[in-house]
Amino acid sequence: MIHRCTERDLHAILSIVNDAAQAYHGVIPADRWHEPYMPRDELQHEIESGVVFWGYEPGGDLVGVMGLQHVEDVALIRHAYVRTARRGQGVGSRLLAHLRALTQHPILVGTWAAATWAVRFYEKHGFRLVTPAEKDRLLGRYWRIPTRQVETSVVLADERWFAGYSEGGSDHDRA
């Protein structure tokens, strides 16, 4: 049911992302909203930048996607979306569990601060918000996003991050 997405899945990925992202319309800052939310060239750029998409496909139809991107010493959850009609059915939870099993690196997630449902989802799965100062540092180090998006985002981290990588943690190189 969960598989690594390929070129043949690009149309379905875009359809899922742009359907699910409608939840952001009127919630995130208006200057960060655009139609479509993710155009094809942006998706292609994300893939070329190392985001590997995984899809949940019960019965032959892709209904949810989630990306995993390894950057330096961490793994990032990127572009996690479930078709509107399939929300609340465990699709995101299954994808997240699968991606967590694929890496031994600490996992970070960036999302819109106003997307309270997304923050709650990750908190339900054991992720915790990092401090605002740590958020700014992490977004600057591991993501390539506009300053305005940094200002309006939060970062959540898994237990591996808090065990040794966060502020006051181990002597891990943060250069």
Image (spheres, rainbow, N blue to C red):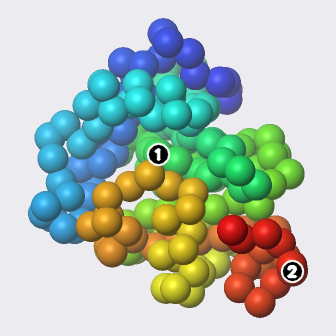
Q: Quadrant of residue 171?
A: bottom right
89 vs 128: above or below: above
Left of 44 or right of it: where is 100?
A: right
Left of 152 or right of it: where is 125?
A: right
Name, please, the residue furthest toward the top.
8
Instruction: Check disc 2 and report its element: helix, strand or loop.
Output: loop
Residue 151 in the image, given as x and y percentages of width and height: 33, 74
Q: Quadrant of residue 127?
A: bottom right
The amino acid marked with disc number 1 is: His
The quarter in which the N terminus is drawn is top right
| Residue on which disc 2 sits | 170
Residue 72 in the image, given as x and y percentages of width and height: 71, 50
- Badge 1 local density, few (<14 within 10 Å), some, or many (20+)? many
Q: Quadrant of residue 26?
A: bottom left
- Badge 2 local density, few (<14 within 10 Å), some, or many (20+)? few
131 vs 158: above or below: below
Q: Which residue shows up at 50% across the image and 55% down it?
A: 143
Q: Which residue shows up at 71% across the image and 85% down it?
A: 167
Left of 56 or right of it: where is 164?
A: right
| Residue on which disc 1 sits | 79
Instruction: Check disc 1 and report its element: helix, strand or loop.
Output: strand
Residue 98 in the image, given as x and y percentages of width and height: 74, 42
Residue 29 in the image, given as x and y percentages of width and height: 19, 67
The quarter in which the C terminus is drawn is bottom right
Which circle's residue, 1 or 2, is located before the other in the chain?
1
Left of 147 or right of it: where is 75?
A: right
Q: Which residue shows up at 31% across the image and 66% down it?
A: 147
